[in-house]
Image (cartoon, grey):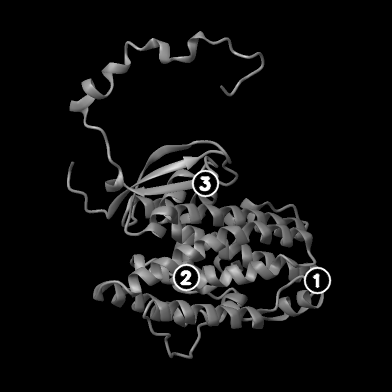
Amino acid sequence: MATDSQLAMWEVFMQSKPGANYIHAGCVHASDKKMALQNARDTYTRRGEGTSIWVVPSDAIVASNPEDDDMFFDPANDKVYRLPTFYVMPEGAKAI
Amino acid sequence: MTQQQALYKYCLRLGDDALIQSYRLSEWCSNAPILEEDLALTNFALDMTGRAQALLGYAGQIDGQGKTDDDLAYKRGERQFYNHLIMELPNGNFATTIARLLFTSTFEFYFYSDLMNSADATLAAIAAKTVKEVKYHMAHATDWTCRLGDGTQESHRHMQSGIDHHWMYTGELFETDEVDAILQDRNIAVDMASIQQRWHQSITQVLKEATLKIPAGEHMQSGSQQGIHTEYLGHILTEMQYLQRAYPEAIW
């Protein structure tokens, strides 16, 4: 990654409405927690996108390594019986 | 002076404060130290433009001569503007701008909190919306004041210099005249003395936390209530009003 002179990186997660999942919205630069929250608010909620924000220091995120993709993810490919496709959807259920 | 004239001028004062401060903050667009701050300052500018629109629009209604918010923003001369001088001062560096924002947003927070109880329903409604916005401006300015004041030697020096530079323009925020007296009698305008006391208390606390000194100077600049301004307002209007002056009635 290129050297970044603009403070530490934080990952921003937004909740669009109460009860909904927090979804990764992007990143901001900030030197402390308060600034990270404010910067996330200023950057990602300008059009009323969110009702709640989480910020997490980027270096606190542990990510899987692409080199491990074959052992991490490929074994699930042939286990179609794990998918709930064999069930009949109850009539009128939308959020499943 | 009639109540109508007083209310008209009161709205111009508040609307002009928002409009001119918005203009200054929007000058940070593409110039702030980091992208996030660029967005923050221009967001504030947009809050203020919205407030100016509401207040100048209401002023036009009170005046009853069919003037729109745009007419009032773009077709008045310098001497007919009533914004406080502090709003029109150049941005300086980032710390200078934060110092001004600390002073003005703290003032506006207490001012609009009280104006929510105005007997004038329109002003009370505008105040209720504005309080939420300026509360955030104040939090942002307060945090930055503490970060820079209690930061490095260099940031401390810049922050103190911003505070010192604006100090003599803060007294004017609390000046009152006939306009306030007439409207206060009818519970439309707010009591400035009480706001000044809370402002002073709050600023003292923030500066202390930021390890900054409260300036000792007692001389305060004045003039905006008579439409007398610093040399900077004319330059702002020249640029801001250029299009309407060059192409009257232009629309898009």
The secondary element bearing badge 3 is classed as: strand
Q: Secondary structure at mark 2?
A: helix
Residue A80 in the image: above or below residue B96: above
Q: Identify the residue position indicated by label 3 in the image.
A: A52
Q: Is residue B214 above or below residue B184?
A: below
Q: Which residue is mark 1?
A: B3
What is the x, y in percent for residue B216? 43, 90
At 45% from the left and 81% from the top, the residue drawn is: B167
Same subunit under labels 3 and 1? no
In this rendering, the answer to whether B180 lies above or below B97 is: below
Front residue (pair A86, B97): A86
Residue at left 57%, top 55%? B74
Q: Are marks 2 and 1 in contact (CB under 8 Å)?
A: no
The residue beneath circle 2 is B102
Q: Is residue B28 visible?
A: no
Q: Residue at x 62, y 81 (%)?
A: B175
Q: Residues within 10 Å of mark 2 (few under 14, many from 20)?
A: many
For the residue marked with disc 3, what is the amino acid?
A: Ser
Single out the mark in the foreground, 3 or 2.
3
Q: Image point 50% across, 58% down: which residue?
A: B22
Q: Mark 1: which secondary structure?
A: helix
For badge 1, the amino acid type reads Gln
Image height of B237 relative to B155, above or below: above
Which chain is home to disc 3? A
> Which quadrant of the view contains residue B199?
bottom right
Query: Residue A3: image x %, image y %?
Result: 17, 48
Count residues near mark 3 (Cα–Cα under 10 Å), then give few for <14, some for 14-19, many for 20+.
Answer: some
Q: Amino acid at mark 2?
A: Leu
Q: Chain of mark 1?
A: B
Q: CA distance from mark 3 to mark 1?
A: 45 Å
x then y, percent, for residue B223 = 56, 79
